[in-house]
Amino acid sequence: MHVSVPIRRTPCRYGGERHYWGCPNCGRWCEVVAMASHGRYWGCRRCLRLRHMSQGLAAADRAQRRAEQLYARAGAEDEAGLIHKHKWMRWRTFNRLMDRADALSHHADGAFVLRALKILGMR
């Protein structure tokens, strides 16, 4: 199979240039052109209906992922699982991040339990 994909270069405001690909299906200019999983045709994210990883996650998984990001931003984790504040971070900022991450983690745990109960038919 032979597919030709045009490339357009657009100058940026502060120098350099940005490359855009022409979608073989819809003709719009986009930054990413991907091949379909079965390998028959190429297209942009809109044509192939591709989603970002976070868009396919359940609400509990999204909350847990966000909590993990906040824990990583708050500090470094040691081998015992404790999070230590970065040297340059204020305690008020560290405590705020940890409280927000704990709340998201508890929300994710509760949503997971509800989903498990629904699967088991108990709710």
Image (cartoon, rainbow, N blue to C red):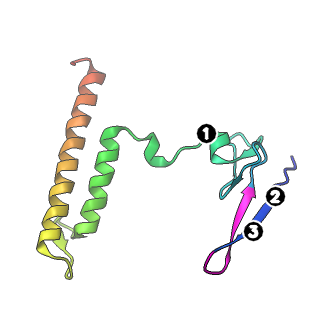
Q: Which residue is mark 1?
A: 49
Q: Is residue 19 magenta?
A: yes
Residue displayed at 17% across by 66% down: 80
**Nearer to us in this view, 120 or 10:** 10
- Residue 7: x and y in percent read 78, 62
In this figure, which residue is indicated by the disc labeled 3?
A: 9
Cα distance between the residues tagged 1 and 3: 25 Å
Label 2 to label 1: alpha-carbon separation: 21 Å
Q: Is residue 56 or residue 96 the one in the foreground?
A: 96
- Let me know if residue 98 is in the magenta part: no
Q: Secondary structure at mark 3?
A: strand
Q: Which quadrant of the structure image shows residue 37?
A: top right
Q: Which amino acid lies under the numbered mark 2 shown in the image of this protein?
A: Pro
Tell me the quadrant of the picture where the C terminus can be found.
top left
Residue marked by disc 2: 6
Amino acid found under the numbered disc labelled 1: Arg
